[in-house]
Image (cartoon, helix red, strand yellow):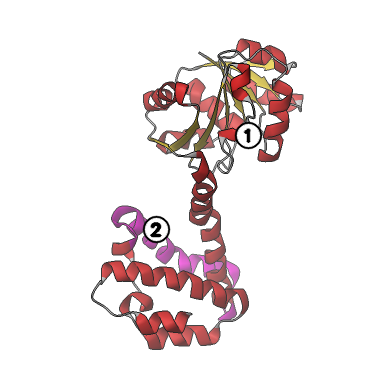
Amino acid sequence: MKFGFIGAGKVGFSLGKYFAENGLDIAGYYSEWKKDALEASAFTGSSTYEDMEQLVKDSDILFLTVPDGVIASVWEQMKSYCLSEKIVCHCSGALSSEVFTDISEHACFGFSIHPLFAVSDKYHSYKELSHSYFTLEGSPEKMDSIQGLFARLGNPVRIIAKENKVKYHAAAAVASNLVVGVLHMAERLMQECGFDKESAGKALSPIIRGNVETVLSKGCVDALTGPVERNDETTVQKHLSVLSGNGLEIYRAVSEELVDIAKQKYPDRDYGKMEAMLR
């Protein structure tokens, strides 16, 4: 099986290198920007293609590692090629395989394959992919083959329904991007108390690191501490009194989520007044 990549950004670089390092046969890269394709092919020990159709001919599995907004238009272009028995994949977290419209008419198979990992560096992120979950969604006829491919690489995989792709992507955004927003809020509040930006980050880092490690090792319920968990209405009310704007809304919304966790931890405890105060 030969793997071809259309698009040579961070995901294309990382996935191609990860495959190559694990002994898979990379045909090469095609990109609208030839310099990127040259870089990616050199990085993965594969070929650079100036013609997309030739890459399609030479590949059994094609990854469209292009921005989400371009996947549909690239697919439209590919429809004019011979695609019989090819497997066509994209790596969008939010889009399903339905972006490959009329794929059955071309006797090929479509998949959305998403690594649950923030690919931040095209030259180094591949080293972390061995620890990543991959979510799969697409043609049932080839699902066993694709699932087996990642199982052989040692990755845990999870098949999800196409109608859950957006919700799944929202979960990933909450765990990644939204956490950054909450931590930025904490830094800002520290700066309002007299810390400079650098010292605020250093001061918060032990509690951030310790909290994340505890969540990962024990789960959210056992990791939860603080005034919401203790049902400390007085302290939470004081917090609400010094916050405003987005900060206040974020505190309320996240604290309501914490109440749900606290109820799991202490099912006999009455959090009714806390809930009313947060609403």
Specify the label residue 99 is tagged with: 1
The image quadrant of residue 269 is bottom left
Residue 238 spot, x, y in % from top left:
46, 87
Q: Residue at x 31, y 63 (%)?
A: 221
State the residue position of label 2.
212
Query: In this picture, is 93 found above or below 152?
Result: below
For residue 100: magenta?
no
Where does the magenta region start and end?
192-220
Q: Where residue 52 sits: x, y (%)?
A: 71, 18
Counting other residues with Cα less than 10 Å from the Cα at mark 1, is it few (<14), some (14-19), or many (20 or more)?
A: some
Residue that appears at 48% across and 42% down: 116
Tell me which label, 2 or 1, sits earlier in the chain. Answer: 1
- Where on the picture, by quarter, is residue 275? bottom left
Q: Is residue 273 left or right of residue 33?
A: left
Q: Amino acid at mark 2?
A: Val
The numbered mark at residue 70 is: none
Residue 195 can be seen, yes or no: no
Q: Give the mark toward the camera: 2 or 1.
A: 1
Image coordinates of residue 19 in percent, x first then y, are: 49, 23
**In front here: 134 or 276?**
276
Mark 2 neighbour density, 10 Å: few (under 14) some (14–19) many (20 or more):
some
* Position in image of residue 91 (x %, y %): 57, 35
Q: Residue at x 62, y 19 (%)?
A: 105
Label 2: which secondary element? helix
Residue found at x 39% / y 89%: 234
